[in-house]
Image (cartoon, rainbow, N blue to C red):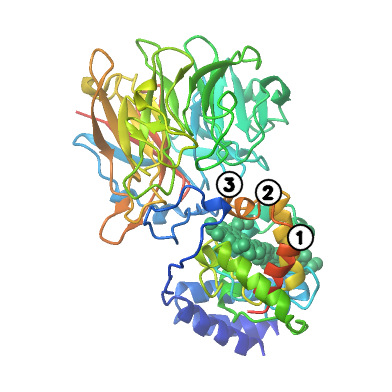
Amino acid sequence: MIRQKIIAAGLLAALACLPGLAQAQQAAPPAWAIGREGSGMAATLAPHAPRLTVTPRDQLPLAAIRLPPGFHAEIYAHGIPGARMMAEGPNGTVFVGTRTIGRVYAITRNADGTTRTRTLLQGLTQPNGIAVLNGSLYVIAINKVLRFDNIEQNLDNPGSGVDMTAAFGLPPEEHHGWKFLALGPDGRLYTNVGVPCNICDFNRDTHALLVSFKPDGSDRRIEARGVRNSVGMDHHPVTGELWATNNGRDWAGNDIPNDTLVRVRRSGEDHGFPYCVGNWADPGAPAQRNCSEFQQPAALLGPHVAALGMRFYDGTMFPEAYRNQIFIARRGSWNRERLNGYDVMVAKLDGQGNVTGIEPFLQGFRDEANNRFLGRPVDVQVMRDGSLLVAEEQYGAVYRITWRQ
Amino acid sequence: MTRVWLLAAALCAAALPAAAQDAIRGAALAEARGCGGCHGPAGRSAVELVPSLAGQPAEFITLQMILLREGLRQAPPMNQLAQGLEDQQVEDLAAYYASLPAGPAEDRAARDAALYARGQALSAQMNCGVCHLPDFSGRNQIPHLAGQREDFLRHTLAQYRDSQRRGTDTNMNAVMYNVPDDAIAALAHFMAQQ
């Protein structure tokens, strides 16, 4: 009986490997598809789910990584399903937030140079926002803000933290409600409030914002309006200006709109969503507006690439040409028939802070020939020694990039 | 019994592809953990509100088991039952249930023509087949719906609507936003009767 079951199981498993034929279906768009009309895109496109189980080290795509000459990639830590946003503590602990798996990890270095990863927190709803300020770890999940004091002294017993949710008073929506958290040179905490839809009419004072707070959650200030969904920001090491990545909307076409790089010259200015991306007026917007009313993006980052974590390079290990340039992780597209992104780019800035170009840095995860991907870089973190960490969400690993003469 | 199984596993392990080896280990684990007591010995549930697992995509089962283990999808008694399962064990269980042929529960009620027709129209209008595929057999993280227990479908669709069930993304919450109970009943009947 059991034997039969096993044989049947084997046969069926083999049969299950045969590719199924996905057929696009034609029908009127339902509520969730508002904004899809007329895109002409394959209707079976759907987000890729990350793997939430441990991927063994020997199955990681290290060998596929390509970097400019002189740079070298190694596996810093692995077996961390869902690894996303990173922050470094004063003693060198790297904290890693996640979305789907609800965990925060802590990576420490052993004496022999290897690393150890602990699951620090679990059971949270999308704890993507991570920052360390004065020895305290701040974690922002959906509608929840937690602070863990003296965290590096308490890695084995972090407790449940100080609940600061009420003080920050962030909106409760889960869709595009996950946060990026950055420290400002002014000692404030900077984060994003995404729009709870693809494109819709919403309150422009509560959503599609970059906002900052005092560390106790008081004194909320709107830094930028009309930013659809930013999941990455950093301050220019010299000018202190806030810069952010921003995700363009879905279902407008394979090549429109672009994700953008936002430069905040003055707090509170309007960057255009849902009306415009640069000079493209979105036909799906609730109203048509003149795009010259809005701030223009500092750069276009590619359609549907999911430009997420970004950091200015303020280290000294890399060649001088990288100083104060922006590393940007592009997690990679789902809402595009040909894959786009799945890499790390560098935005080159001139002395005036104008972007002069966007160049590839870490490549090899996008398999053009087979239209599939081997990894999804979600965040970059400049370590105190000047090396660059890259968090890869799909297979749960952190890579370390170094440079030598 | 178990010994026979181990022997069989050892004999065929070398010759079978990796997924089949996982399925063999998964079959033993499902037996040891008594999954079949609720989900049915062949993965087709005969118990009210317990979903059938046979023929679900392995990726879907794996992801749901992790959400259940981590307490992110609240679904008693599964949260408790998933405790202590290692990642590899979860993948083995998933490979096993994915390898079993899907099919309706033995106690499936007769078709109600009017309810079925309404569910069919709603499914077309709400594009269920775009993600779940036109025959509702699922793919990757998107579950197989055809022949699933009607009571479970009704229960879980209402949970998505009421933000009581959280998935690997927010698509289903968006799909079910504001859908009334009678429409859910029709959709559940239509899917169960596939």
Q: Is residue B93 visible?
A: no
x and y, in percent, of residue A268 in the image: 49, 15
Q: Is residue B136 visible?
A: yes
Most foreground residue, A31 or A371: A31
Residue on which the image places disc 1: B181
Q: Residue A100's mark?
A: 3
Asked if the residue at tag 2 contacts the one at tag 3, i.e. Cβ–Cβ closer than 8 Å, the answer is yes
Determine the residue positioned at 74% across, 67% down: B185
Judged by depth in the image, the label closer to the viewer, 1 or 2, is 1
In the rendered image, residues at marks 3 and 2 fall on the same chain = no
Q: Amino acid at mark 3?
A: Thr
For residue A392, which quarter of the picture?
top left
- Considering the image in quadrants, where does the C terminus of chain B appear? bottom right
Chain letter, disc 2 residue: B
Task: Give the class, few, some or many, for how many residues have Cα within 10 Å of label 2's Cα (few <14, many ≥20).
Answer: many
Vertical position of residue A109 compared to residue B120: above or below: above
- Considering the image in quadrants, where does the N terminus of chain B appear? bottom right
Q: Residue B72's mark?
A: 2
x and y, in percent, of residue A380 in the image: 40, 32
Which of the two discs, 1 and 2, labels the residue nearer the N terminus?
2
Q: Amino acid at mark 1?
A: Asp
x and y, in percent, of residue A289 in the image: 41, 29
Most foreground residue, A364 or A262: A262
Task: Give the class, few, some or many, for how many residues have Cα within 10 Å of label 3's Cα (few <14, many ≥20).
Answer: many
